[in-house]
Image (cartoon, grey):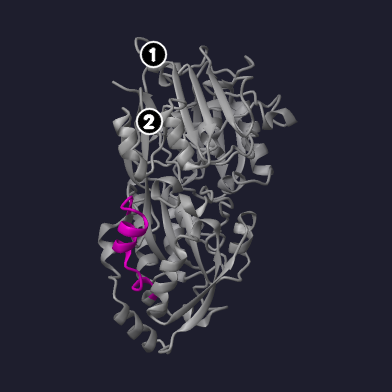
């Protein structure tokens, strides 16, 4: 199989000040759920939510799957959606099926859908959106790389022809790649700020770009019962302390709760919904072939690095208990995760030194790593752990706007990175495919290439999970990275209910419902 899928160039994690390095503040969690109307409760009318990063654009070809999706996924329908248990469900497409060879995907659209302008949402609109996204550079373009062409067979039927089988396509169509834009307006400059949408809400004129987004529900929306809130207000509050203050002041009724603030919020009547994993702190062993730093080309050296970290202590002390130790980059709620792998590398500096000596480095070696804004709190711990086995670390500060260019520069053979968890297919691509942004040296291995091809081509969800579990097994046992901990998050809510459990990490207001 010839791989043509490219990487997702924009990590969903956004860096925060080092003072915000509690697990809850690292990433506002994302999830999908259901909800029903409850007209007898005032809370059914409004959801006021705090997020930490500003939507970059509402152009369907430029939207991304980070926290911006809390806003754009209310303005645009997606073809499918993933529920709060991580299962794909019909959405704008009420059904879908693959051809026997897996190279043709046919989707049947729900009848009677309309854009906020009143124009029909039909197969021609889906085709126009997909065609434009595939032709427009951006974070979503790469997710459609396997598509050869899109056909509007009739008003309600979309046929997607593929270059190769793509097991991640359905998941992508439940997120940014599946958004349906209005062909008459989606190329207009105004769309980036105020789009004509296909979704359940419209952007109210009282919204302030970059600060507050006020969403008003469309009563003519085809699936209005799935959205119990008549008004949704999304406030951009980057500082977690300010977010907690906004919760206590009643300015918002849903937001992230840092561990140190949870008790106060609970006493104030908020429900606290803890989620064990929304992101992963990972020491990326980028130069796996040793092209810049020769020792890293030896599996024993990479395994020694994994044995240098007291992950349990880091999770308890540095991350204040709102984290869990891990050796894996895949979501622990996904089928790719394997609990047995967590025993692969116990904390053992003496054994790590022995491995380095066997590999020909009894005196260790030195490495320069990029210091990002969000790594500062981790740097002393990482430096000491590696120094204890003979690896000397020097940190080079990197401005936030240069994070991605620093990763892709091939200057840094080791990179400490905090990344929001994604579906297994995207995690595998981002971390291990030659084009992955967390594989900047384009490291390959014949056995891993075969496993990736098998996983990407598997259309059956159960078999796909097993295939990605094998990718995970290879990555851990060959020490392609040195993950440290899953970072958790807690939602504080009052009058509304958080419905997610961490199985799905896509940001959508369908993660919230009306409480009791």
* Part of the protein shown in magenta: 305-323
Residue 241 vertical position relative to residue 194 in the rendered view, above or below: below
Tell me if residue 72 can be seen. yes
Above or below, comparing residue 513 to residue 18 in the picture = above
- Helix, strand or loop under label 2: loop
Residue at figure coordinates x 62%, y 41% from the top left: 149
Badge 2: how crowded within 10 Å, few (<14), some, or many (20+)?
A: many
Q: Position of residue 447 (x, y in %)?
A: 42, 69
Residue for point 32% across, 59% down: 317
Question: Picture coordinates of residue 17 (x, y %)?
Answer: 52, 51
Front residue (pair 369, 225): 369
Which quadrant is the C terminus positioned in?
Answer: top left
Report how many numbered discs are placed on residues in the image: 2
Q: Residue at x 71, y 24 (%)?
A: 184
> In the rendered structure, which disc, 1 or 2, sits on the residue that comes first in sequence?
2
Read off the residue under disc 2. 33
Residue that appears at 38% across and 88% down: 357
Question: Between residues 313 and 358, which one lies in front from this camera angle?
Answer: 313
Q: CA distance from mark 1 to mark 2?
A: 20 Å
Quick check: 299 above or below 438? below
* Residue 326 placement (x, y as % from top left): 33, 60
User: Is residue 78 visible to the viewer in this orientation of the structure?
Assistant: no
Tag shown at residue 236: none
Residue named by callout 1: 42
SS of the residue under disc 1: helix
Query: Is 120 left or right of 418, judged from the image as shown?
Result: right
- Using a 10 Å C-alpha cutoff, classify the residue at mark 1 as few (fewer than 14 neighbours), some (14 to 19) or many (20 or more): few
Looking at the image, which residue sits at the far top? 40
Q: Is residue 395 magenta?
A: no
**Residue 65 percent location from the top left of the image:** 53, 41
């Amino acid at each position: 199989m010839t791989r043509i899928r490219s990487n997702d160039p924009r990590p969903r994690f956004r860096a925060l000040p080092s003072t915000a390095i509690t697990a809850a503040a690292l990433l506002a969690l994302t999830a999908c759920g259901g909800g029903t109307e409850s007209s007898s409760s005032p809370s059914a009318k409004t959801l006021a939510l705090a997020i930490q990063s500003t939507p970059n654009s509402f152009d369907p070809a430029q939207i991304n799957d980070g926290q911006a999706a809390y806003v754009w996924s209310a303005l645009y329908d997606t073809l499918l959606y993933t529920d709060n248990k991580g299962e794909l469900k019909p959405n704008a497409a009420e059904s879908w099926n693959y051809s026997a060879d897996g190279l043709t995907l046919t989707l049947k659209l729900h009848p009677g859908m309309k854009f906020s302008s009143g124009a029909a949402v039909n197969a021609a609109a889906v085709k126009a959106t997909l065609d434009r996204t595939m032709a427009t550079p951006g974070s979503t373009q790469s997710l459609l790389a396997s598509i050869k062409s899109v056909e509007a067979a009739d008003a309600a039927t979309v046929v997607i022809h593929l270059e190769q089988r793509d097991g991640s396509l359905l998941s992508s169509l439940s997120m940014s790649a599946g958004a349906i834009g209005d062909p008459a307006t989606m190329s207009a400059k105004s769309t980036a700020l105020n789009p004509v949408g296909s979704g359940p809400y419209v952007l109210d004129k009282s919204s302030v770009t970059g600060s507050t987004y006020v969403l008003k529900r469309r009563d003519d929306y085809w699936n209005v019962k799935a959205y119990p809130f008549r008004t949704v207000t999304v406030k951009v509050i980057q500082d977690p302390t300010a977010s907690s203050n906004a919760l206590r002041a009643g300015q918002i009724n849903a937001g992230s709760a840092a561990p140190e603030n949870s008790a106060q919020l609970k006493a104030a009547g908020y429900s606290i919904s803890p989620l064990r994993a929304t992101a992963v702190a990972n020491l990326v062993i980028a130069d796996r072939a040793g092209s810049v730093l020769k020792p890293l080309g030896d599996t024993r050296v990479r395994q020694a690095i994994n044995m240098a970290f007291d992950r349990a202590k880091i999770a308890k002390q540095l991350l204040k208990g709102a984290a869990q130790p891990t050796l894996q980059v895949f979501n622990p709620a996904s089928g790719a995760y394997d609990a047995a792998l967590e025993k692969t590398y116990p904390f053992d500096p003496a054994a790590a030194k022995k491995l380095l000596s066997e590999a020909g480095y009894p005196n260790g070696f030195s490495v320069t790593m990029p210091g990002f804004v969000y790594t500062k709190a981790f740097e002393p711990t990482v430096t000491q752990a590696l120094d204890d086995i003979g690896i000397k670390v020097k940190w080079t500060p990197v401005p936030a706007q240069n994070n991605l260019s620093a990763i892709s520069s091939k200057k840094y053979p080791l990179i400490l990175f905090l990344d929001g968890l994604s579906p297994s297919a995207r995690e595998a691509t981002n971390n291990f495919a030659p084009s992955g942004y967390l594989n900047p040296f384009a490291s390959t291995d014949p056995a891993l290439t075969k496993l990736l091809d098998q996983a990407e081509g598997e259309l059956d969800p159960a078999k796909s999970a097993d295939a990605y579990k094998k990718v995970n097994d290879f990555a851990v046992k060959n020490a392609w990275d040195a993950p440290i901990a899953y970072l958790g998050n807690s939602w504080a809510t009052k009058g509304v209910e958080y419905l997610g459990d961490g199985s799905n990490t896509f940001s959508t207001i369908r993660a919230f419902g009306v409480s009791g």
